Image (cartoon, helix red, strand yellow):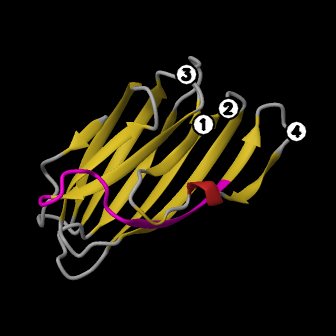
Amino acid sequence: TISFTSGIDSTYDEYVFKFYDIHPSGDGVDFEFQVDTGTNTNFNQQITSTVFRAYHNEGDSDNGLSYATSSDLANGTGFQRIMANMDHDNDSNGSGTLQLFNPSSTTFVKHFITTTNYVYNSAYTFNQFTAGYVNTTTAITSVRFKMESGNIDSGVIKLYGVS
């Protein structure tokens, strides 16, 4: 797990996380995120989201655009999947962004957008789009990234504030 527990405050209206060459330690695992507030440190905020993916396989025999219902959350408290079924082969990894809007608001829910590109199941490139909101009016102060199981073997995650 990688947790950002400081630097998310009212200084900026938008925070952008950029992740580069995220590589799992195991096969078939998901890269996920969840947020928390200063009063709740369990990383279990309610999220509502929707996910769709464009994909193409390296053999040029399969491609398409699909709605990923299994990655949606409906006011769920689990971690939000943003890259699915990643492998730990040397040529497998993923990169992308998470935009978190107005996390310090104590009036509104917190919207987010993720865009990722990753190697899926060792043979596909997936471009995944996830959008939704964290259903809390309490300020978000922490963001955690993790693999659904196993470890993040390598990669870089950077945080930027956008004014």
Q: Residue at x 27, y 50 (%)?
A: 143
Relative horizontal placement of residue 47, taking residue 57 as reference (left or right)? left
Tell me the distance, in whole angstroms, between the alpha carbons under discs 2 and 3: 10 Å
Relative horizontal placement of residue 67, taking residue 92 as reference (left or right)? right
The kind of residue tagged 4 is Ser
Expressed as whole percent of the image width and height from the top left, the position of residue 35 reads 29, 55
Q: Check the image and report above or below for 160 versus 2.
A: below
Furthest residue in direction bottom, as rendered: 107
Furthest residue in direction right, as rendered: 61
The kind of residue tagged 3 is His
First along the sequence among labels 3 and 4: 4
User: Do the residues under discs 1 and 2 have CB atoms within 8 angstroms?
Assistant: yes
Tell me the distance, in whole angstroms, between the alpha carbons under discs 1 and 2: 6 Å
User: Do the residues under discs 2 and 4 have CB atoms within 8 angstroms?
Assistant: no
Magenta span covers which residues?
38-53
Tell me the distance, in whole angstroms, between the alpha carbons under discs 2 and 4: 15 Å
Label 2 element class: loop
Expressed as whole percent of the image width and height from the top left, the position of residue 92 reads 58, 26
The kind of residue tagged 2 is Asn
User: Do the residues under discs 1 and 4 have CB atoms within 8 angstroms?
Assistant: no
Relative horizontal placement of residue 118, taking residue 144 as reference (left or right)? right
Which residue matches tag 3? 88
Relative horizontal placement of residue 125, taking residue 45 as reference (left or right)? right
Which residue matches tag 2? 121
**In the rendering, which numbered label is found on residue 85?**
1
Q: Residues within 10 Å of mark 1 (few under 14, many from 20)?
A: some
